[in-house]
């Protein structure tokens, strides 16, 4: 063991005395203001608490609780912290300022992190789009910009020339539905797809009620 680092491990064994799980529960890097504590109750719930004192005197903590079960090892069942979460980066929409005069041009969304933006294309049979989605609490993401072409009233398709990616757009007055019909894995994480319904948002440039152009 290196002199500059000390660690305390917990090791778990099954009923046949075979090693089943292990993890460090306390460690020290000789860092000033950092402390740790480990507790285990009568039900073998392991609770780890790590604290650090910031330069301004504020004490930050992170607490995790684990339970041991044969076959699964140590499983995290609870976590708590007063440390600030990292700031979520803003979504950059590369087509936001393009014209939106076509009947389907506009912004569609499920929430602030799942959006479809449609802007005018080179003619009435085409449109430019930008899609950004985040699923599974942000662990599965996808983003794509391209041009789609209408194949029937309210239905359009995008097909990439550089990979198998293809997406079908189905428009109704209230929104748009996406369906991935070709493998778009280059543009997204492996376990999620370009799919779902996105509600149309009111345009910030819309005229007030009672006014006509």
Image (spheres, rainbow, N blue to C red):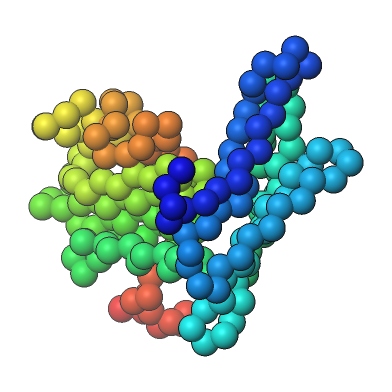
Q: Is residue 79 above or below residue 162?
A: below
Q: Which of 179 and 175 is in front in this view?
A: 179
Residue 199, can we see it?
A: no
The residue lying at 74 percent from left, 27 percent from top is 69
The residue lying at 20 percent from left, 40 percent from top is 149
Q: Which of 113 and 203 is in front in this view?
A: 113
In the picture as drawn, the residue positioned furthest to the right comes out as 42
Image coordinates of residue 77 in percent, x first then y, are 71, 43
Image coordinates of residue 26 in percent, x first then y, are 61, 52
Residue 89, can we see it?
A: yes
Instruction: Say left or right for 209 vs 156.
Output: right
Q: In this view, does 36 lie above or below 208?
A: above
The residue lying at 52 percent from left, 79 percent from top is 54
Q: In which quarter of the image is residue 181?
A: top left
In the picture as drawn, the residue positioned furthest to the bottom comes out as 56
The residue lying at 25 percent from left, 51 percent from top is 129
The number of numbered discs placed on residues in the rendered structure image is 0
Instruction: Say left or right for 139 vs 120.
Output: right
Instruction: Say left or right for 117 vs 70.
Output: left
Image coordinates of residue 138 in percent, x first then y, are 46, 50
Image coordinates of residue 179 in percent, x first then y, are 39, 33
Q: Quadrant of residue 91?
A: bottom left
């Amino acid at each position: 063991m290196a002199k500059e680092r000390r660690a305390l491990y917990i090791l778990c064994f099954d009923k046949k005395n075979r090693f089943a799980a292990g993890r460090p529960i306390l460690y020290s890097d000789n860092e000033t203001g950092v402390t740790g504590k480990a507790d285990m109750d009568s039900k073998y719930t392991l609770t780890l608490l790590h604290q650090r004192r910031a330069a301004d005197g504020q004490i930050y903590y992170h607490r995790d609780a684990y339970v041991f079960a044969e076959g699964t090892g140590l499983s995290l069942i609870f976590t708590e912290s007063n440390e600030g979460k990292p700031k979520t980066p803003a979504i950059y929409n590369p087509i936001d300022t393009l014209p939106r005069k076509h009947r389907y041009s506009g912004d569609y969304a499920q929430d602030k992190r799942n959006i479809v933006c449609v802007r005018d294309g080179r003619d009435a049979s085409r449109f430019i789009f930008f899609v950004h989605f985040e699923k599974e609490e942000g662990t599965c993401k996808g983003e794509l910009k391209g041009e789609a072409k209408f194949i029937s009233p309210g239905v359009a398709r995008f097909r990439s020339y550089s990979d198998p990616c293809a997406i079908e757009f189905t428009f109704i007055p209230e929104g748009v539905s996406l369906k991935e019909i070709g493998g778009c894995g280059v543009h997204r994480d492996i376990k999620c797809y370009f799919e779902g319904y996105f509600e149309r948002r009111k345009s910030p440039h819309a005229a007030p009620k009672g006014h006509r152009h």
